[in-house]
């Protein structure tokens, strides 16, 4: 069986600053893998290397068996199969929610306006913002914007989804709505690679949790093990700080 | 603590800041009043009115002022504006291109046409037929005027667009690309429409600048039906040996430029409020 994502010996440096120092990671189809770790540990960079928003300095990345680090790869074709959700939503502010979800279907998948609209409405409905079709991003709350962004990615029928700290820019009371949508996706069997600070979500939903620190994977395994009973000192320190910030 | 405010006191104790302010304002009014009195006493109002605001001469200018002169000013300006908008966008994209020679070409163009007086460009255009035998600017004088305004305006508009394109957050391109759009597709559907929205206020100012620069068409040696406001005013002024037509032309410019200026600042304000 081909891996959904396979990362081998991945290095990434920005100038002299080496952010990723040899990462190996695989995600199987249908799996939910959460990446946790302190800020600056390279989690987001790792995620962005999967769809080549960052070009790795060394190492290989395969998505469904296709090497995306191959210079001759048709990256646009690979990206069509990878949905990406950003911390800052990145909705297109000059388009309504509906248009946001339709535009790539129209321009990339060449769907008819009619089909694109049907798919868009379905997905907006699915993430619970079906009544916001005609609103512009500026008129929506952060949680609504992020759900539109998820619908926008889903409308492309991706095989896997990347989530880059999807709830970090949200007001606390809006986090739940977005996590509910993500939980639903996971239950439907979507392959997901999620960078998150939501330990509760990781513990409940993730098949595997990866703890990163200083550009390397320190520990990985089932959530119950990595979060529940970590073996590495660095993991323990991090979790203590995240779970009991007052101590 | 107690002596801190004391140290801030001016050396001339006794004059409170408020009192000093009042004196300063009084002096300013006194200077203004003196200047007005001098103006009234020494200016020859009769002669001024004769030369700059003679009703009879102003009436002579009337139908043609709007039907020919203002119309042509608008033709030159709108034409030059469309030219500079399109070429300016192209230059801005070249200026930000990954391809280095494109960047160089754009930089050289922008520096040259912003650095030269617009008048010089217009003078050179009149020599184009000599430099390129057989070459004719299409649409005759209109074409020449539009070309001159467009060449200069494009350089400024390119910098306006560059600022707009750079102001679109990088995440917008990333979102578009991660949906599978090509780099070009992402620019066209996501980045450029947002950049254009952002540059509407400075572009309105550019339009006003072009409108004023359209007076340089005067130096193309135009006549008759091609005459725009400045040339029109100047010709009539020579004819009557009286400056009134130039004043009339000036007022006509203001009728257009002042509302546009207000529009630009209102658009600016609206942009500040949203997002």
Image: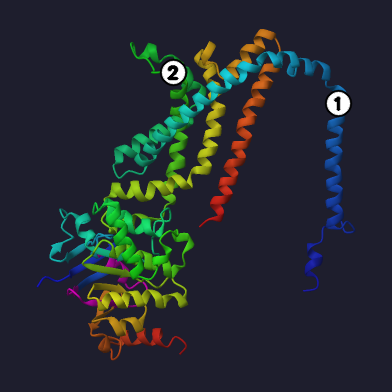
- Proximity of marks 1 and 2: CB atoms separated by less than 8 Å: no
State whether discs 1 and 2 lie on one chain.
Answer: yes
Q: Is residue B187 magenta?
A: no
Taking the image as shown, residue A167 lies to the left or right of residue A61, namely: right
Question: What's the chain of the residue with tag 2?
Answer: B
Quadrant that contains the N terminus of chain A: bottom left
Q: Check disc 2 and report its element: helix, strand or loop.
A: helix
Residue B33: percent from left, percent from top: 86, 35
Q: Which residue is mark 2?
A: B125
Residue A231: percent from left, percent from top: 26, 89
Q: Is residue A37 magenta?
A: yes
Judge by depth and name the residue closer to the eye, B220 or A98: A98
Judge by depth and name the residue closer to the eye, A219 or A194: A194
Q: Residue B40, which numbered label?
A: 1
Q: Residue at x 37, y 41 (%)?
A: B95
Q: CA distance from mark 1 to mark 2?
A: 46 Å
Q: Residue at x 40, y 61 (%)?
A: A133
Q: Is residue A199 above or below residue A112?
A: below
Q: Residue B269, which numbered label?
A: none
Looking at the image, how many numbered discs can be counted on the residues?
A: 2
Magenta residues, as a range?
A: A25-49
Q: Is residue A24 above or below residue B8?
A: below
Colour scheme employed for the rendering of this structure: rainbow
Residue B55: percent from left, percent from top: 75, 16
**Location of residue A228 (image quadrant):** bottom left
């Amino acid at each position: 069986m081909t891996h959904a994502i396979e990362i081998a010996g991945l290095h990434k440096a920005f100038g002299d600053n080496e952010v990723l120092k040899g990462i190996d990671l695989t995600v199987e189809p249908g799996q939910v893998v959460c990446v946790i770790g302190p800020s600056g540990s390279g989690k987001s960079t790792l995620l962005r290397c999967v769809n080549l928003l960052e070009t790795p300095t060394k190492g290989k990345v395969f998505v469904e068996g296709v090497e995306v680090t191959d210079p001759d790869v048709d990256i646009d074709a690979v990206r069509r199969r990878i949905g990406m959700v950003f911390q800052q939503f990145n909705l297109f502010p000059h388009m309504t929610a509906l248009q946001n979800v339709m535009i790539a279907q129209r321009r990339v998948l060449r769907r008819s306006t009619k089909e694109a609209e049907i798919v868009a409405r379905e997905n907006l409905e699915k993430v619970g913002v079906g009544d916001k079709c005609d609103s512009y991003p500026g008129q929506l709350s952060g949680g609504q914007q992020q759900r539109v962004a998820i619908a926008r990615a889903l409308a492309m029928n991706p095989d896997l989804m990347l989530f880059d700290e999807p709830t970090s820019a949200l007001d606390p009371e809006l986090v739940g709505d977005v996590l509910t949508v993500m939980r639903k996706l996971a239950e439907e069997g979507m392959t997901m690679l999620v960078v998150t600070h939501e330990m509760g979500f990781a513990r409940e939903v993730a098949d595997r949790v990866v703890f990163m620190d200083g550009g390397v994977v320190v520990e990985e395994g089932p959530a119950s093990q990595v979060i529940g009973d970590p073996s590495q000192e660095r993991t323990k320190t991090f979790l203590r700080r995240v779970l009991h910030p007052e101590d | 603590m107690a002596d801190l405010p004391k140290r801030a006191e001016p050396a001339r104790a006794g004059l409170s800041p408020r009192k000093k302010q009042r004196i300063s304002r009084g002096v300013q009014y006194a200077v203004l009043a003196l200047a007005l009195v001098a103006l009234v006493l020494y200016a020859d109002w009769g002669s001024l009115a004769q030369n700059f605001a003679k009703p009879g001469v102003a009436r002579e200018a009337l139908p043609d002022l709007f039907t020919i002169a203002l119309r042509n000013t608008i033709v030159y300006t709108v034409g030059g504006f469309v030219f500079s908008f399109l070429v300016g966008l192209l230059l801005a994209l070249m200026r930000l291109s990954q391809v280095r020679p494109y960047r160089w070409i754009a930089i050289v163009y922008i520096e040259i046409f912003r650095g030269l007086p617009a008048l010089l460009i217009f003078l050179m255009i009149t020599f184009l037929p000599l430099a390129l035998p057989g070459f004719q600017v299409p649409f005759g004088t209109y074409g020449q005027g539009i070309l001159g305004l467009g060449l200069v305006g494009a350089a400024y508009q390119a910098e306006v667009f560059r600022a707009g394109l750079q102001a679109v957050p990088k995440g917008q391109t990333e979102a578009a690309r991660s949906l599978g759009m090509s780099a070009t597709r992402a620019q066209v559907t996501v980045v450029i429409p947002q950049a254009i929205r952002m540059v509407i206020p400075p572009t309105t100012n550019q339009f006003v600048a072009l409108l004023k620069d359209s007076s340089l068409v005067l130096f193309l040696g135009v006549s008759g039906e091609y005459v725009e406001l400045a040339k029109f005013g100047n010709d009539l002024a020579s004819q009557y040996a009286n400056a009134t037509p130039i004043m009339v032309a000036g007022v006509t410019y203001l009728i257009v430029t002042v509302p546009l200026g207000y529009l630009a600042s209102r658009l600016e304000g609206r942009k500040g409020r949203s997002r």
